[in-house]
Image: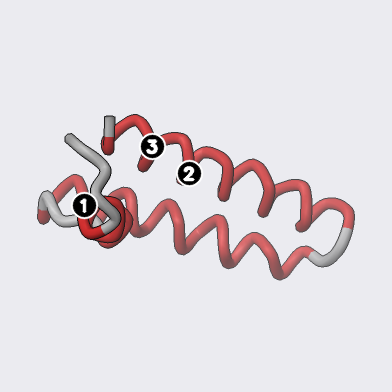
Amino acid sequence: MRTRIVHAVAGTFILVSLLLSIYININWLWFTAFVGANLLQSSFTKWCLMSDILAKLGVED
């Protein structure tokens, strides 16, 4: 369950930041890059801050 939430949040962040970069300011693409870099980092280290936050909130894995 936690993994699905993490993926949903990451996908939402990417889509929202792309829309913001189109309609508000192109600098929102830095946020998109940050989310992508975090996804890449978590694939190597198997550590994800969002997953830790969800675990502390009591979301089951």
Q: Amino acid at mark 1?
A: Ala
Q: Earlier in the sequence, mark 3 or mark 1?
A: 3
> Dot 1 surroundings within 10 Å: few (below 14), some, or many (20 or more)?
few
**Can you tell which of label 3 and label 1 is closer to the viewer?**
1
Q: Within the image, what quadrant is residue 31 found in?
A: bottom right
The kind of secondary structure element at disc 2 is helix
Residue 2 relative to residue 24: left or right: left
Compared with 45, 14 (above or below) is above
Residue at image position (32%, 56%) is: 50
Distance (Cα) linking label 3 and label 1: 11 Å
Describe the element under mark 3 as helix, strand or loop. Answer: helix
Cα distance, mark 2 to mark 3? 6 Å
Q: Which residue is mark 2?
A: 9
Is 20 on the left or on the right of 14, as rendered?
Answer: right
Residue ID for mark 1: 55
Residue drawn 29% across and 60% down? 53
Q: Whole-percent x and y of residue 4? A: 34, 30
Which quadrant of the figure contains the N terminus?
A: top left
Residue 5 marker: 3
Left/right of residue 21 with respect to residue 55 in the rendered view: right
**Residue at screen point 45% across, 56% down:** 35
- 16 vs 26, left or right, is left
How many numbered discs? Answer: 3
Q: Looking at the picture, which amino acid does disc 2 mark?
A: Val
Find the distance from the CA under tag 1 to the CA under tag 2. 15 Å
Tell which of 58 and 31 is nearer to you.
Answer: 58
Q: Amino acid at mark 3?
A: Ile
